[in-house]
Image: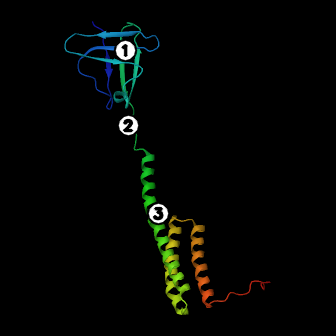
Amino acid sequence: MASAVNCCLSSSCFTLQSKLKSLSLRNSADSSSYALHQNSSAFKTLSFSNNLSHNFFSKGSLSISTMTQNPIRRTVVCEAAPKKKADSAAKRARQAEKRRIYNKARKSEVRTRMKKVLEALDVLRKKPDAQAEEIFSIEKLIAEAYSVIDKAVKVGTLHRNTGARRKSRLARRKKAVEIHHGWYTPAPAGNAA
């Protein structure tokens, strides 16, 4: 009986052609080659070496074992790697991208509201004949900006200190405009005891 080649294939391993002419196994340690030949009808040659083709073996592993009865007989076993679940890193990447877009929109809204308030305060400050009642419309804009900042802090888009700093910036700018026009006089700073 001619030398036999046993090839056990799992689900996702490579498929061998149905008819083999010869199978050459090269050992890189001693550079010797062994050939197993079968009938010489229309067969193709398949050779394996240490530098195996990545296309064939990217999803499986190859093990070659020597039988002790016949030194020429070899067994080629192809085992597919176990199916892995969906990569958790890919899921994390999807979640991070979703949060990035959501947070970007929230931060943009915060900046837009702050910009509206600051521009309105600048216009009011430069206006020479401003009335005290004009600050009420700006206070509505400030309340809307505070609401947006608080929501951004609540959902975790902004740190609470960042939110407090932004709100404080708006309040200080409003107070500066009120002091500039004489609508607000701060208390003297040295008499607190």
Residue at screen point 53% across, 92% down = 133
The disc label shown at residue 103, or none: 3
In three-dimensional space, the C-alpha distance between marks 3 and 1, rounded to whole angstroms, equals 58 Å
Secondary element under disc 1, as helix, strand or loop, is: strand
The first of marks 3 and 2 along the sequence is 2
Question: For this rendering, which residue is in front, 191 or 130?
Answer: 130
The disc label shown at residue 83, or none: 2
Secondary element under disc 3, as helix, strand or loop, is: helix
In three-dimensional space, the C-alpha distance between marks 2 and 1, rounded to whole angstroms, equals 28 Å
The residue type indicated by label 1 comes to: Leu
Indicate the position of residue 106 as horizontal and vertical percent values. Answer: 46, 67
Q: Is residue 95 above or below residue 21?
A: below
Count residues near mark 2 (Cα–Cα under 10 Å), then give few for <14, some for 14-19, many for 20+.
few
In three-dimensional space, the C-alpha distance between marks 3 and 2, rounded to whole angstroms, equals 36 Å
The first of marks 2 and 1 along the sequence is 1
Q: Is residue 26 above or below residue 190?
A: above
Image quadrant holding the N terminus, namely top left
Image quadrant holding the C terminus, namely bottom right
Depth-wise, is mark 3 or mark 2 nearer the camera?
3
Count residues near mark 1 (Cα–Cα under 10 Å), then give few for <14, some for 14-19, many for 20+.
some
Indicate the position of residue 110 as horizontal and vertical percent values. Answer: 49, 71
Q: Residue furthest right?
A: 193
Mark 1 — residue? 25
